[in-house]
Image (cartoon, helix red, strand yellow):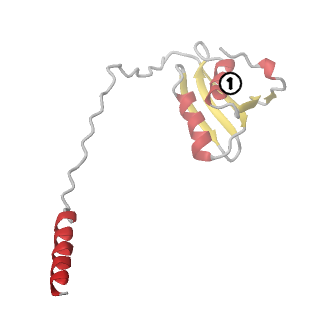
Amino acid sequence: MKTLKYILGLFVISAILVSCKNENSPEIKTVDLADEEVKEKVLNPDANYVAAKFEIDGMMCAMGCAKVIEKNIAQMDGVKTVEVDFESKMAKVEFDEDIVTRDLVIANVKKTGDTYEVTSWNGEVLNAPEEIIEE
């Protein structure tokens, strides 16, 4: 019986010594960056900027919907400022009318997600989806 306790004790001690290695080596990951140049948006100071206000239906949340729509419109060439308010479901955008059109902004909103729909533009109600021309 004494021999069995001795063997069992040695087994437990050796198991603890072998399994308790706290040497965690950090995992190193390398990420290849694309060689693409980041296109910086340049606004024409002599352009005729037009402000528009439109209503967007289909937004479910402020961060996941409104901010994504705002970011996507802001990335368009010719857009100076954009603000999307989730609470009122309204968006305000200031853009160069020579580069950006109403239809381009509406198509961009629709491209962001199938649930988003522009229902009015500067107070004009957009009834039929045929009014929206997508690229």
Q: Where is residue 109 in the image (x, y as percent from the top left)?
A: 65, 28
The image quadrant where one finds the N terminus is: bottom left
Image quadrant of residue 70? Answer: top right
Residues 1 and 50: in front is 1
In this picture, residue 16 sits left or right of residue 56: left
Name the residue at 83% across, 23% down: 128
Q: How crowded is mark 1: few (under 14 residues within 10 Å), some or many (20 or more)?
A: many
Name the residue at 58% across, 17% down: 48
Q: Residue furthest right?
A: 127
Q: In this view, does 133 lie above or below 109?
A: above
Q: Tally the numbered discs.
A: 1
Q: Position of residue 44 (x, y in %)?
A: 48, 17
Image quadrant of residue 29? Answer: top left
Q: Position of residue 59 (x, y in %)?
A: 68, 41
Residues 32 and 125: in front is 32
Name the residue at 15% across, 75% down: 10
Image quadrant of residue 24? Answer: bottom left
Residue under label 1, please give it: 106
Q: Hey, what amino acid is under mark 1? A: Ile
Q: Is residue 18 above or below residue 89?
A: below
Q: In this view, does 92 lie above or below 86?
A: above
Residues 109 and 51: in front is 109
Under circle 1, the secondary element is helix
The image quadrant where one finds the C terminus is: top right
In this picture, residue 97 sits left or right of residue 42: right
Q: Where is residue 13 in the image (x, y as percent from the top left)?
A: 17, 74
